[in-house]
Image: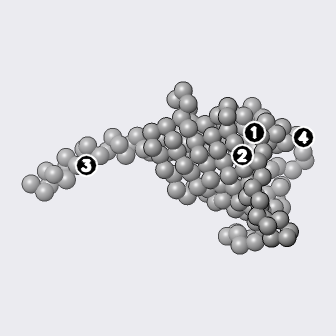
């Protein structure tokens, strides 16, 4: 009886697990496109990862120790990354938690940022994505930035 119950539980759970994995892969693909667009200065690729009403923010600590939240528009971000430069903007992320509820996803990605081969800063990105017309788009991103206490540096 226990074997039958375990078998039935597995049969009914597998489609949900497969669906979650497919959605996680699609979410990762959106975020990966964002960083590929940054490395290649591909403004069309960058812009395609965001929803039309996306918000971008950064938490920074000023020299006097005061913490502030800065807001940047997606268009300003895309234009800044798209400017010609001699060195690649290389944000190296690792995936932490990915949580999905229907058309909403939350993703945590620790990162290290390099300009060319030179370390610049590190922190964590917190993404909120929304599934629009079948595609995952970044709706909100907020990140932290620091130069110390980074794993690789």
Where residue 122 sits, quadrant-wise, is bottom right
The secondary structure type at the circle numbered 4 is loop
Give the foreground label among 3 and 2.
2
Which residue shows up at 37% across the image and 46% down it?
17
Q: Which residue sits at x=45%, y=43%?
A: 101
For marks 4 and 1, give the CA distance. 18 Å
Query: Residue most toward the left?
Result: 1
Label 2 SS: strand
Q: Which residue is mark 4?
A: 84
Tell me the number on the disc at residue 56: 2
Task: State the image coordinates of residue 78 (x, y, percent, origin top left).
Answer: 79, 38
For label 3, the crowd category at 10 Å Cα-Cα, with few meaning under 14, some 14 to 19 and many 20 or more, is: few
How far is disc 1 from disc 3 in space, using C-alphas?
43 Å
Q: Which label sits in the foreground, 1 or 3?
A: 1
Q: Which residue is mark 1?
A: 74
Whether residue 40 is visible, yes or no, is no
- Is 110 left or right of 105, judged from the image as shown? right
> Is 148 displayed left or right of 110 in the figure?
right
Q: Nearer the viewer, residue 27 or 140?
A: 140
**Mark 1 and 2 residues: CB-CB less than 8 Å, in contact?**
yes
Q: Is residue 34 above or below residue 153?
A: above
Residue in the picture at 51% in, 41% down: 104
In the picture shown, does residue 51 fall above or below 18?
Answer: above
First in residue order: circle 1 vs circle 2? 2
Identify the image quadrant of the C terminus: bottom right
First along the sequence among labels 4 and 1: 1
Q: Earlier in the sequence, mark 4 or mark 2?
A: 2
Which residue lies under the disc numbered 3? Answer: 10
What distance separates the C-alpha of mark 1 from that of mark 2? 7 Å
């Amino acid at each position: 009886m226990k074997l039958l119950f375990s078998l039935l539980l597995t049969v009914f759970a597998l489609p949900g697990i497969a669906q979650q994995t497919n959605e996680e892969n699609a979410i990762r693909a959106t975020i990966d496109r964002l960083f590929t667009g940054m490395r290649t200065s591909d403004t069309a690729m960058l812009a395609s990862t965001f929803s039309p009403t996306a918000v971008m923010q950064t938490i920074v600590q000023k020299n006097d120790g005061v913490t502030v939240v800065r807001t940047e528009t997606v268009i300003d971000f895309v234009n800044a990354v798209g400017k010609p430069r001699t060195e690649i903007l290389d944000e190296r992320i690792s995936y932490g938690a990915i949580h999905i509820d229907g058309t909403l996803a939350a993703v945590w990605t620790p990162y290290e940022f390099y300009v060319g081969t030179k370390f610049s800063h590190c922190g964590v990105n917190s993404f909120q994505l929304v599934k629009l017309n079948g595609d995952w788009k970044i709706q909100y991103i907020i990140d932290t930035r620091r130069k110390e206490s980074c794993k690789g540096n």
